[in-house]
Image (cartoon, helix red, strand yellow):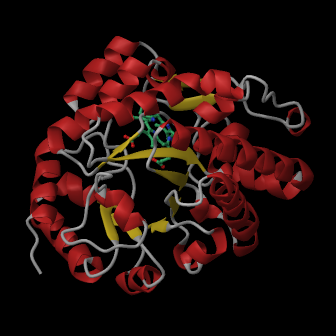
Amino acid sequence: MAPTRKVADVLRGRAAFPPPVWIMRQAGRYLPEYRATRARAGGFLDLCFTPELAVEVTLQPIRRFGFDAAILFSDILVVPHALGRDVRFEEGRGPVLQPIEAGEIGGLDQSRFHDVLAPVYETVARLRAELPPETTLLGFCGAPWTVATYMIAGHGTPDQAPARLFAYRQAPAFHALIDRLADVSAQYLIRQVEAGADAVQIFDSWAGVLDEDLFERFCVKPVARIVEAVRAVHPQVPIIGFPRGAGVLVEGYRERTGVSAVGLDWTVPMAQARRLQQGGAVQGNLDPLRLVAGGAALDDGVDRILAGLGGGPLVFNLGHGIVPETPVAHVEQLLKRVRGAVR
Ligand code: 1CP
């Protein structure tokens, strides 16, 4: 009999209480064992592309906390790297890319895409073999809009002004970039599923800076295109969409993109979250700073989510990634609170 993987089950719409739990960026700098492996790896991309090390850091939070899902250790920016763009991760500065110009988009080189990403697929396969059978393995990619923001600006920005201006001023080239990213991202997710991922998440971390028109064209449509392409090959695989910061535009996101589950950031009000849950699973949405603060701020935040969303299909998570200064003891407190919950 196939093992029960709670996160995957909930993502398909089956409610469980207490809900299964994992944390975005659960492998990361708040863990001393991550910092040690990271130091050993040298560069950040070396960590992503050395299966032995990527497997190790993916498993670290599973060993320590027993989360219900493991998320592949990699980064959304391996996709531009695999398209031949120069991508570096600088200590204390984050990702730095060579900003793409309109004239370069047609020439993006896809010929080595899967060869460059082969170590990622190997990491997924090794993970599925090593993980406890009940732990869901999540693959992921960045949504085209979010990946494009880094390709255009060359680094993170607070409002993605360079990418928004590019979209307005050079619309045909921008469209071509988004379409290309949607196609290769779908191929990338399909390979992850074939290597053993039980479900996948599409991170649209910068969905929140677009007006309604651009949100529809550059967040909703390309994610729908990815979902359609993945489902054509793997009709049953759960897909989580995470349009961070979309505000009221998240209404109807599941129906318009075809994702199985919607990831919610912490600003989504409970009434809206409950409405979204009528259509299927939701994931989220504790403020990561409640986890930094601990104490009553953490307990109250957890209780509120469990009371509001615990009656339906919920994957408990933060509303965005865990921050490096989070005390490990607070993660333990969160898990105890979620897992000890009674209704
Ligand atoms: O040196 C380090 O250790 C760098 C920190 C770091 C880590 C731990 C980066 C650089 N990436 C990662 C791993 C990572 N990135 C994962 C691993 C799996 C996990 O445990 O969750 C995932 C899923 C991502 C996804 C990612 N990368 C996103 C989407 C999710 C989100 O947080 O919004 C984004 C926007 C990135 C880009 C990126 N990579 C790294 C940084 C610091 C950033 C953000 C840069 C910025 O906007 O300024």
| Residue at figure coordinates x 38%, y 87% from the top left | 271
Q: Nearer the viewer, residue 15 or 204?
A: 15
Q: Residue at x 16, y 72 (%)?
A: 300
- Depth check: give the residue in front, 306 or 120: 120
Answer above or below: position of 197 versus 205.
Answer: above
Q: Residue furthest front?
A: 1
Q: Position of residue 129 (x, y in %)?
A: 34, 32
Find residue 308 and report its image quarter: bottom left
Image side of residue 275 versus residue 190, left or right: left
Left or right of residue 216: residue 20: left
279 relative to 326, above or below: below
Say which quadrant the C terminus sits in: bottom left
Q: Picture quarter containing residue 66?
A: top left
Is residue 270 something that shows in the picture?
yes
Q: Can you say whether 295 is above or below 34 in the image?
A: below
* Residue positioned 51% across, 45% down in the render: 140
User: How far from the left and from the top, in percent, is residue 278?
Assistant: 44, 85
- At a point 30% along the width and 78% down the height, the residue shown is 309
Q: Is residue 35 above or below residue 289?
A: above
User: x and y percent of residue 120 in the render?
Assistant: 51, 28
What x and y, as percent, mark residue 10?
35, 67
Depth check, front residue: 318 or 19: 19
